[in-house]
Image: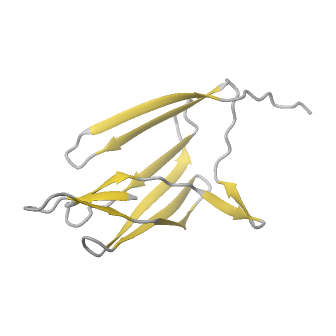
Amino acid sequence: MRLLFNFPGQVPIPAESAVTIVNAGGNERMSKFFAHARIEQPITTEIVSTIEIHRASDHHYGTKVTLTIPPIANYAGAVTSLDLTLGKPLRGKRAGLFTLRCPTGKTLTRGSAMFLDGSRHEFSAISPCVATIPKGP
């Protein structure tokens, strides 16, 4: 996670932290995780965000992931970059949390970010994939 702190009367100060993700439970319709980051400089603070993963109601997009980041350093800090890899150990090996099927030869990705000032940024991407045909009985 990369952040930028903008305190009054100072030049913006960059910061960086590793992110630890832990399972926070959920149910058969939703999985919940906590993402924890500890910042040492320019101030010492901890950031605990929530990640919720559930089936999307839109038939084009099968999974919806919602990441909620709390105010950082009384709104002086902002996340500028975040890379997460979600997986789980399975018999000593890393396994993914998602299953991706490719019936049409392309995957559709859509996302949005909502900011403190109420503005919103939306994005989408279409990526090619190898179409798979389910095997019959």
Residue 58 x, y percent position in the rendering:
52, 33
Relative depth, front residue between 108 and 28: 108
Q: Taking 96 as reference, is 93 above or below it?
A: below
Q: Is residue 47 left or right of residue 106?
A: left
Q: Is residue 27 left or right of residue 120?
A: right
Q: Residue furthest top?
A: 104
Q: Taking 114 as reference, is 47 above or below it?
A: below
Quadrant containing the C terminus is: top right
Residue drawn at (67%, 40%) of the image? 100
Q: Taking 33 as reference, is 61 above or below it?
A: above
Q: Residue furthest left?
A: 9
Residue 22 x, y percent position in the rendering:
53, 68
Residue drawn at (73%, 27%) of the image? 131
Q: How many marks?
A: 0
The image quadrant of residue 73 is bottom left
Residue drawn at (19%, 61%) of the image? 76
Relative depth, front residue between 16 and 87: 16
Residue drawn at (29%, 76%) of the image? 44
Relative depth, front residue between 101 and 16: 16
Residue 61 x, y percent position in the rendering:
55, 34
Q: Is residue 117 left or right of residue 109?
A: left
Residue 122 x, y percent position in the rendering:
36, 34
The image quadrant of residue 13 is bottom left
| Structure colour scheme | secondary structure
Quadrant containing the N terminus is: bottom left
